[in-house]
Image (cartoon, rainbow, N blue to C red):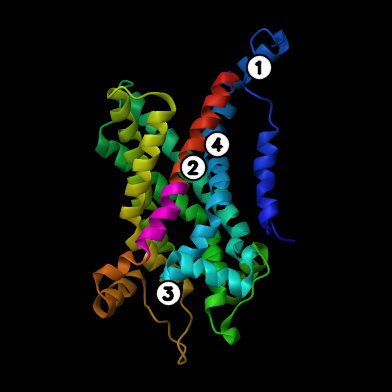
C-alpha cells in the first residue's frame, strides 16, 4: 500500500492539523489541570529536544503538499522537456492526467519527514548552542552560514534515499517505454533499488545531494535569520518580518543551490549506456561534461520554475514553522 500515494491522502495531514485545539482559548476557560499539563510539557527536556525536529518535519511536509506539482514540472524541464513551465504542465496533464502532477508525492513526503526534520532540527539546536556561546546575542552572518551548511549536509545524508526515489519516480515517464521502472510507490521503489543496486544504491548521487543541500540551507537559513533581524531593526514586526525574511530566503536558497541540484538530478536519473558504462563517472565529471558540451548557463536551466518551486516551498515551510512555534508558545508547550 502506498504511503500518501494519492493527492487526497496528502491533504489528510492538513485536515488533521486543522482539527487540533485552537490556541485562542482564553485563560478564563483554561482549567488548573491544563495549566499544570502545559507547564509540565514546557519543562520537559525530551519534548524541548524533539520539538525543533517535529516542527521542522511537519512544516516541510505541509509545504510539499502545496508545491509538489511545481516540483514535477521543474524535474521534467531539467530532464529536457521543452515548452516552458505551463506548456510542460499542460503536456503532463494531457498525457497522464492531472493526478500525475502528484506522482512521487509519497517519496516527497518521506523526504521531508527525514531530510527537513533533520536539517531544521539540527539548525535550531546548533544555532541555540552558538547563541549561548555568544552571550545570547544575534550571530554574525558567517556563523549563521556555518550553521546552515552543517544542518544541510547532515540532513541530506538522512534524506538521500527518499530524494533518490522521488527523482526516479518523477523522471520515469520521460524514459523510453522499455527502460521505465514503473514503480508502484515509494516502498516498491526503495525495495527494488536495494534488490538491483544494493543498499548503496539508495545513496547514489549522495555527494551532489549533500553539496546541494549545504548550499541551499546556507542560502535559506542564514539569509532568513539575517533578513528578519534587519527587518525587525527597521521597524517591521510580526508576520511582516516573518514573510519578508522567508521570501528573501527563498531567492537566495534558489540561486545558491540550482547548479548543484542540476548535477544531482542528472546523476540520479542516469541509466547505463549500451556498453554497460555509466554516462558520468561522478558529480565532478557530470559538471565538467555539461560545462564543456552545453555551456555554463545550462546549470541554470529552468531557473524561473526552480525559483517558483523552491521560493514558495521555503516561504511556506518557514511560515508554517513560525506558526507552529507561536501556537506552541501560546499553549505553553
Q: Earlier in the sequence, mark 3 or mark 4?
A: 4
Query: Which mark, by number, is residue 316?
Result: 2
The residue at which mark 3 appears reads as 82
Give percent across and percent down for residue 47: 59, 28
Identify whether 231 is placed above or below 171: above
Instruction: Report the Cα–Cα distance between label 3 and label 4.
Output: 38 Å
Q: Which numbered disc, 2 or 4, marks the residue closer to the eye?
A: 2
Q: Earlier in the sequence, mark 2 or mark 3?
A: 3
Label 3 SS: loop
The residue at which mark 1 appears reads as 25
Q: Earlier in the sequence, mark 4 or mark 1?
A: 1
Instruction: Report the Cα–Cα distance between label 1 and label 2.
Output: 25 Å
Q: Is residue 75 magenta?
A: no
Using the rendered view, name the quadrant where residue 41 is placed.
top right
Identify whether 60 is placed above or below 160: above
The residue at which mark 4 appears reads as 55
Whether residue 279 appears in this view of the structure is yes
Q: Tell me which residue sits at (44%, 63%) in the image.
A: 206
Q: Which numbered disc, 1 or 3, marks the residue closer to the eye?
A: 3
Instruction: Report the Cα–Cα distance between label 2 and label 3.
Output: 28 Å
Give percent across and percent down for residue 329: 54, 21
Chain part drawn in magenta: 302-312
Amino acid at each position: 500500500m502506498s504511503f500518501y500515494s494519492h493527492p487526497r491522502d496528502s491533504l489528510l495531514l492538513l485536515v488533521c492539523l486543522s482539527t487540533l485545539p485552537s490556541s485562542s482559548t482564553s485563560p478564563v476557560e483554561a482549567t488548573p489541570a491544563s495549566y499544570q499539563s502545559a507547564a509540565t510539557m514546557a519543562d520537559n527536556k525530551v519534548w524541548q529536544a524533539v520539538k525543533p525536529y517535529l516542527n521542522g518535519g511537519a512544516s516541510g511536509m505541509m509545504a510539499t503538499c502545496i508545491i509538489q506539482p511545481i516540483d514535477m514540472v521543474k524535474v521534467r524541464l531539467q530532464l529536457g522537456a521543452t515548452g516552458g513551465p505551463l506548456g510542460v504542465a499542460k503536456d503532463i496533464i494531457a498525457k497522464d492526467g492531472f493526478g500525475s502532477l502528484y506522482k512521487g508525492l509519497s517519496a516527497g513526503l518521506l523526504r521531508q519527514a527525514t531530510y527537513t526534520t533533520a536539517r531544521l532540527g539540527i539548525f535550531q539546536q546548533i544555532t541555540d548552542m552558538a547563541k549561548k556561546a555568544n552571550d545570547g546575542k544575534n550571530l554574525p552572518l558567517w556563523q549563521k552560514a556555518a550553521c546552515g551548511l552543517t544542518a544541510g549536509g547532515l540532513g541530506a545524508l538522512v534524506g538521500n534515499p527518499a530524494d533518490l526515489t522521488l527523482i526516479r519516480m518523477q523522471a520515469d515517464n520521460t524514459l523510453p517505454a522499455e527502460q521505465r521502472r514503473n514503480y508502484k510507490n515509494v516502498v516498491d521503489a526503495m525495495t527494488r533499488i536495494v534488490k538491483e543496486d544494493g543498499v548503496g544504491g539508495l545513496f547514489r548521487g549522495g555527494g551532489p545531494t549533500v553539496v546541494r543541500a549545504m548550499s541551499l540551507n546556507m542560502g535559506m537559513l542564514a539569509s532568513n535569520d539575517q533578513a528578519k533581524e534587519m527587518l525587525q531593526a527597521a521597524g517591521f514586526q510580526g508576520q511582516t518580518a516573518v514573510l519578508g525574511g522567508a521570501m528573501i530566503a527563498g531567492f537566495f536558497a534558489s540561486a545558491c543551490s540550482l547548479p548543484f541540484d542540476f548535477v544531482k538530478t542528472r546523476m540520479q536519473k542516469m541509466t547505463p549506456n549500451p556498453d554497460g558504462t555509466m554516462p558520468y563517472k561522478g558529480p565532478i565529471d557530470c559538471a565538467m561534461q555539461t560545462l564543456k558540451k552545453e555551456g555554463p548557463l545550462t546549470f541554470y536551466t529552468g531557473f524561473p520554475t526552480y525559483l517558483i518551486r523552491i521560493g514558495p516551498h521555503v516561504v511556506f515551510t518557514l511560515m508554517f514553522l513560525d506558526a507552529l512555534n507561536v501556537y506552541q508558545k501560546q499553549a505553553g508547550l
